[in-house]
Amino acid sequence: MVFHAVPRSAIIDALVHIRELHRRIKPSNEREIRAYERREVVIRDLLSNLPRTSEHPTLKTLLEIAEICWLTLEGAHRLFGYDLEAIRDFDLRLNGGRTHIFESYPFNRDLPVDLPARLASHESFGVDASLRDLVLEWQKETPIRVIEEDGWKKPGAFYVHVGTEDSLGSSIPPGAMALVEPIGENEKALPNPRAIYLLQFANGYRCSHCVVTRGTLRLFSTERAYFAREEFAYPGAVRIAGRVRMFAINLPVPDHPSLRPLPHAARGADLILPWEHVTRDSLLATKRRRFKRSKEEKEFIQQFLRTELQAKLSERSERRYRSDTSSDPHVNALLHLTLANVARYTDALRTGGSWFSDRGRFSLETLLNATSLEEASDADRNAHLPTPVDVWEARRKEFGEWPPLLSIKFPQLQRWDDRVIRLSQGGGIKDLDPAIGPGSWLLLERVSSIPDTRREGRRYGWSRPIYVLRKGLEMICGHLARDGDQFALLADRVGEVKQTFRIDSLAQLNRVSGIAVPV
């Protein structure tokens, strides 16, 4: 749930406590005196007006509280009952069918996560191994904000969710999360046909291989199930937004019966990326043109967000915020506009000039539990880059960065060390596109009953279950087939056998439930 009502008494108590923390620090110069006086005035007025105001504050009020109280973006929202971390789930529920740039900012800056501290040798990464054998020491209970620092994050990188409805012909499976990194002008002019790029169109996005010749960009895939128009004027009708470095997905991929190419649009949006917009209204208007919705979709989203956010926006109000206006939206209204127009909340804030960084700010929980600002500062923890540095850099080159979405989903990653393995040479399964390449990480689950190999054999590609058989130090990956009490791991649909084993060896068999693949 993105929003739950907070009693006014709880907000008042929190503001009084935070004000007392700041009062204990005497201002030492003119700038600090002005900040002190402004804080006193704003909090006094808010305490006076709270009983008479809506439970949904204006964005201006919320961000002013964040600034004067040194609260993080998430902390200021939580004060008024908003859970920004829930936005991702809402986004997937409402917009998962469309390929779109996805929110990866860790709003909960103090979320304690496990990060690697000491890695095994280069030689250890040269063979198949489990997470336990590759990460020898961990930095536990580390605030997730540290992965925004140099050495963990790739500058300019962002994430895209591959749609489960509009990605027919995509070179990345539907439902995946993919990391995209920026590229230079030379590569944009002459893209590598072996690489996969995120392509922006007037009516959406697509992950694909492509080539450019004589002002034309041609899309292609190793799977020829897609026969729509594959050539576009370049750069007029398509833009290369970046190169896909890795993708992660739950397995097996479910069937998506409504999978189709990008919808036709008589007039789509300009080829501009979200962070390039100067104003919020421009961002929202462009998003609306790029992601057209049917009447039924609009009605469903309106009802859903009205229930979850208590945001009753009329079409007239939505139009106003997509135009140049001095109107200041309430927070629930801006969240509604963000989700309804397939935007990231961080982009909606930055383009409005409202917020840019959480650096130097505290979470609400940290301030409420502190008896002084010095105590709150002492609670801050840093993390060092994993050692040996050369091994860490080699791993970072494989995936581009330490994915924030990984730490958000698996904050206590060390607990999964027996269930996570790395394939040094790839999976060796021939009918997957893209292939399970060298350096892929797999999440395993025990096989509790005999698999229905006949039913599984009717599925294709990433939709067919993948298994790993552990034989000592060897890990063999493939699809599963059965003949009586004899099983076989297959490299392809033709039936090339990689390994056979009997039913009494099922205890060594694991099913792959998730995978991260460098591309």
Image (spheres, helix red, strand yellow):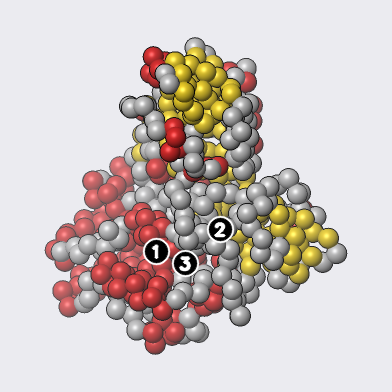
Quick one: quadrant of the N terminus?
bottom left
Mark pair 3, 1: CA separation? 9 Å
Pinpoint residue 429: horizontal percent, then vertical percent.
Answer: 60, 32
Q: Is 318 situated above or below 200?
A: below
Q: Quadrant of residue 440?
A: top right
- Which residue position is annotated with label 2? 167
Mark sitting on residue 163:
none
- Check whether the beta carbons of the residues at disc 2 and disc 1 lie within 8 A of each other: no
Of residues 405 and 260, the one drawn nearer to the viewer in this rendering = 260
Of residues 405 and 150, the one drawn nearer to the viewer in this rendering = 405
- Which residue position is annotated with label 3? 342
Mark pair 2, 1: CA separation? 16 Å
How dense is the environment of label 1, judged by Cα within 10 Å: few (below 14), some, or many (20 and up)? some
Tell me what residue is drawn at x 62 percent, y 17 percent. Answer: 123
Pinpoint residue 270: horizontal percent, then vertical percent.
Answer: 63, 74
Pinpoint residue 380: horizontal percent, then vertical percent.
Answer: 38, 41
Mark 2 and mark 3 lie on one chain; the one further toward the N terminus is 2
How dense is the environment of label 3, judged by Cα within 10 Å: few (below 14), some, or many (20 and up)? many
What amino acid type is highlighted by mark number 2? Answer: Ser
Mark 3 and mark 1 lie on one chain; the one further toward the N terminus is 1
Q: SS at mark 1? A: helix
- Which residue position is annotated with label 1? 94
Q: Is 154 situated above or below 325?
A: above
Residue 242 visible:
yes
Of residues 240 and 98, the one drawn nearer to the viewer in this rendering = 98
Q: Is residue 515 shown left or right of residue 430?
A: left
Q: SS at mark 2? A: loop
Q: SS at mark 3? A: loop
What amino acid type is highlighted by mark number 1? Answer: Leu
Tell me what residue is drawn at x 71 percent, y 54 percent. Answer: 220
